Amino acid sequence: MALRKEQFYQSLYFAKQIQLANGQSLFDFMRSCSRGFTALDAAEVAYDDKAKASYFALQYFPTLRRVDSGKPVELQILLERRGDKLIPGSAFFTSNALRYSDFLKRHNVTCWKAAE
């Protein structure tokens, strides 16, 4: 249980450093646009046998709403932090969140909470 908690806190640390294409940090996006952080959000140390190097495997699961129905949808943001490089672990939502400022529109989703 203590390890899981540590991985969650590490994920918060990295989320504050990751800049999304819309200008928000991943931390701010998860806090203000998603339903919130989940117990599954984590930063875990992993090891690449080929490169003979360790790295952080990062995972976040934002819950947003579908534009057409308003129903909740959980997406994945999967990343690898290798040194100072951030590598998307998914060509779907993760890559778009880092590359396109309109990534929510591209996936037909909106923030969990309506803009105030």
Image: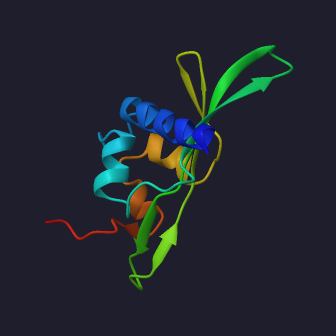
Is residue 97 or residue 25 the one in the foreground?
A: 25
Is residue 6 or residue 105 the one in the foreground?
A: 6
Task: Give me the residue at 50% from left, 72% from top.
Answer: 73
Quadrant assignment, res 93? bottom right
Residue 3 percent location from the top left of the image: 62, 37
Q: Is residue 114 left or right of residue 16?
A: left
Is residue 80 or residue 10 the one in the foreground?
A: 10
Residue 107 percent location from the top left of the image: 48, 64
- Is 77 rendered above or below residue 25? below
Task: Give me the residue at 65% from left, 41% from top.
Answer: 89
Residue 90 percent location from the top left of the image: 64, 47
Residue 97 percent location from the top left of the image: 46, 47
Quick one: quadrant of the C terminus?
bottom left
For this orientation, the residue located farthest to the left is 116
Is residue 41 or residue 65 the one in the foreground?
A: 41
Colour theme: rainbow
- Is 99 rendered above or below residue 82? below
For this orientation, the residue located farthest to the right is 50
